[in-house]
Image (cartoon, helix red, strand yellow):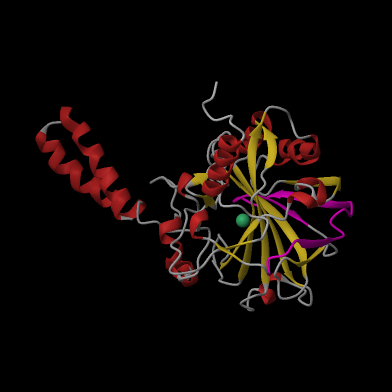
Amino acid sequence: MRSHWKKQVIVLPSLGRVSSKMQQLILPVLLASFWTTCTGAGDWCYQSQFTCDHQCKAPDNWNHAHSDCAGRNQSPINIVTRKTLKDEQLTPFQFDNYQQIFRGTIKNNGHSVQVGVPHLSTISGGGLPTNYKAVQFHLHWGNNGGPGSEHTIDGEQYPMELHIVHMKHHYTDLTTALSDPQGVAVLGFFYERSNSANRKYEPIINALQSIKAANGNTSLHSVSLAQLIPAEQNLTAYYRYKGSLTTPGCTEAVIWTLFENPIPLSMEQLRAFSELKFHSGKQMVGTFRPVQPLNGRQVFRSGGAVILASSALLLAAIAAALGLSQTN
Ligand SMILES: [Zn+2]
């Protein structure tokens, strides 16, 4: 909390108009009140929620109540593509029942928007040790379409990130799955701003209007997981590493997959998420945890994933070979 303490001290020179005697009285009172309100007590929150009036534990203090948040295998991370290692075992995923249309409940849980999924859709292949079934999905976003993804690629933060949470097929609840170091597999998808609206997202975007308040929920009629993600043939390029939940308890039981191909949404669609509210009534924005240290972990890439720098070089080489480079 030292950084917040420093920030508040900057406020003090604005007391310049007050007499020095008054300052002698006011300063200790202010300092004492900052000390008590800015120590980060209360429930966990994102940095965007933290104010001295609203006591909550911002990401730097999550480990005070949840020791795993200070572990060595935390998520999210920044993926440096040139340091990734190609792994031939990272074959395409098999998605089963991802086309299945279901009726679900979409909820503003005070930290995010989350949809419970019937445990029918499963994933296998993709270098996973066994089959995993979908449990829920939720999103992380920025402020009105600004940077908001949790993972970053070569330092780039996308406007939003989708997490489809799966657990090993033989578990019946997430809590049990989290006690297994490989119990959970999360598929992460980035979003990119596009010029046209993504019609497949209309059910979700429309439902947001009804769940602006924290704990609000409403029904989603006929959605499938497949309609929310890129077509299967565009999902062969991905990154893989071992990490954690990105919210407290930060349990290190997650096999992470981040797909290279982003999902397009219009600016208006991205902005709709910023209309949701936290419990405090404040705008729900910046719902991402900052990137965490790798601590020596290796990030792998699938056969289909390209290193961005080398693909640029490859294109340059092709252009040169075709005589397109600087000839006209
Ligand atoms: Zn998440």
Residue 148 visible within the image:
no
Magenta-drawn segment:
89-116
78, above or below 270, in the image? below
- The quarter holding residue 178 reads bottom right
- Identified at 74% across, 30% down, the residue is 197
User: Is 72 on the left-hand or right-hand side of 15?
Assistant: right
Q: Nearer the viewer, residue 8 or 316?
A: 316
Q: Position of residue 99 (x, y in %)?
A: 87, 53
- Identified at 79% across, 52% down, the residue is 232
User: Is 299 on the left-hand or right-hand side of 100?
Assistant: left
242, above or below 288, in the image? below
Q: Position of residue 323 (x, y in %)?
A: 58, 31
- Identified at 77% across, 36% down, the residue is 206
Q: Position of residue 276 (x, y in %)?
A: 63, 39
- The quarter holding residue 18 reads top left
Q: Nearer the viewer, residue 324 or 192?
A: 324
Q: If the picture is divided into quarters, which one holds ligand 1?
A: bottom right
Residue 14 visible within the image:
yes
Q: Is 24 contained in the magenta span?
A: no
Q: Position of residue 279 (x, y in %)?
A: 58, 47
285, above or below 151, in the image? above
Q: Is 102 contained in the magenta span?
A: yes
